[in-house]
């Protein structure tokens, strides 16, 4: 029997307003980049997402992307929608790339403050510093203090290393390794608490111990992929998708939350939820002719992504569960 997934309560999460971004960070869970279509969440989809999350017990969210500040008028519109539904905005995420000068930044922050935004989560890491000069980050932090918006950093642990470099330019991960040691990026994965999904899989594949498929199968819980039911940090995106757990590239129609998911409509997610990566592996092999490409993997997540990419790119299946398609081609 297939155990049915039912996401009936939402704890803490956010709205992804856009996947396009000024950066292509190597740790990005959602594979955001400048290459994505420049689409921003529309009024109808935002309202639908907000209605559902509120009906399932969540009355406080954050706003993220992509980079939400790449379309400031639309960002303010989303903020107003959230306010009208009496949902608290915990913070807006930003990589600071949009900072041009203090005057324009402070004008934008003052508008957001007038619209009820009190906090910015400002990204600080070597992964962001590959694309955003730290001087922009420092200047945005100063603008926050001047306007009364509180900036908090994810994560401040990297400040000593980043501040020791030339803040006027970007720095590659290789440069960080050359300066701080060969283990620096490997250790940074733990310091940043990076999830082994999306583009970060390339980092995990390079820096983490690898396991055979049988090794991966042997340590998996018999309960399947329990992460899919976790709502401690959920996301809805601009296309009306709910991303289960932190499993980017998997999607549930937001309207299907609050009830048991049909295995007919969601065969992949249902298989992963009830039978785990081993069940999904044999499902893809038997139904679509999947054959593993590598002798070893850094985690079950890397293997899962390889299977899903095969289904999209080679088996050419059209699946409501494997969205957005750009995730698999980015």
Image: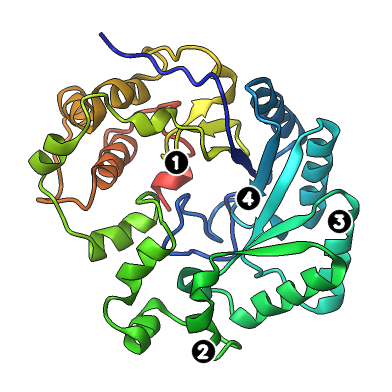
Q: Earlier in the sequence, mark 4 or mark 3?
A: 4
Tell me the SS state at disc 3: helix
Cβ–Cβ below 8 Å for labels 3 and 1? no
At 73% across and 73% down in the image, what residue appears?
A: 140
Disc 2: which residue: 164
Cβ–Cβ below 8 Å for labels 4 and 3? no
Percent position of residue 292, x then y: 14, 42
In three-dimensional space, the C-alpha distance between marks 2 and 1, rounded to whole angstroms, equals 33 Å
Q: Residues within 10 Å of mark 2 (few under 14, many from 20)?
A: few
In three-dimensional space, the C-alpha distance between marks 2 and 4, rounded to whole angstroms, equals 28 Å
> Residue 141, relative to residue 38: is it above or below?
below
Q: Is residue 248 visible?
A: yes
The disc label shown at residue 246, or none: 1
Tell me the SS state at disc 1: loop
The disc label shown at residue 64, or none: 4
| Of residues 32 and 289, the one drawn nearer to the viewer in this rendering | 32
In three-dimensional space, the C-alpha distance between marks 3 and 2, rounded to whole angstroms, equals 32 Å
Q: Residues within 10 Å of mark 1 (few under 14, many from 20)?
A: many
């Amino acid at each position: 029997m297939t155990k049915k997934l039912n996401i009936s309560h939402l704890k803490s999460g956010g709205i992804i307003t856009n996947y396009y971004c000024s950066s292509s960070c190597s740790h990005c869970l959602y594979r955001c980049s400048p290459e994505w279509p420049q689409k921003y969440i529309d009024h109808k989809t935002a309202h639908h997402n907000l209605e559902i999350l509120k009906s399932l017990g969540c009355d406080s969210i954050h706003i993220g992307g992509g980079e939400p500040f790449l379309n400031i008028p639309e960002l303010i519109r989303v903020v107003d929608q959230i306010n009208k539904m009496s949902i608290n905005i915990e913070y807006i995420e930003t990589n600071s790339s949009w900072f041009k000068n203090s005057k324009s930044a402070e004008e934008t922050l003052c508008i957001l403050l007038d619209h009820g935004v009190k906090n910015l989560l400002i990204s600080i890491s070597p992964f962001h510093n590959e694309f955003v000069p730290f001087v922009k980050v420092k200047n945005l932090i100063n603008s926050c203090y001047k306007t009364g918006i509180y900036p908090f950093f994810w994560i401040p642990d990297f400040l000593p290393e980043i501040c020791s470099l030339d803040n006027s330019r970007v720095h590659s991960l290789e440069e960080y390794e050359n300066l701080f040691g060969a283990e620096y990026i490997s250790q940074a994965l733990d310091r940043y608490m990076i999830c082994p999904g999306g583009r970060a899989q390339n980092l995990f594949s390079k820096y983490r111990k690898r396991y055979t498929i049988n090794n991966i199968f042997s340590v998996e819980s018999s309960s399947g992929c329990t992460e899919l039911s976790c709502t401690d940090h959920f996301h809805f995106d601009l296309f009306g998708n709910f991303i289960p757990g932190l499993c980017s590239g998997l999607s549930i129609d937001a309207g299907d939350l609050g009830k048991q998911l049909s295995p007919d409509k969601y065969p992949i997610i249902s298989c992963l939820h009830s039978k785990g990566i081993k069940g999904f592996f044999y499902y893809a092999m038997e139904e679509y002719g999947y054959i593993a490409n590598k002798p070893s993997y850094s985690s079950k997540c890397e293997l899962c992504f390889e299977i899903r990419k095969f289904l999209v790119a080679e088996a050419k299946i059209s699946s409501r569960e494997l969205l957005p398609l750009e995730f698999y081609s980015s």
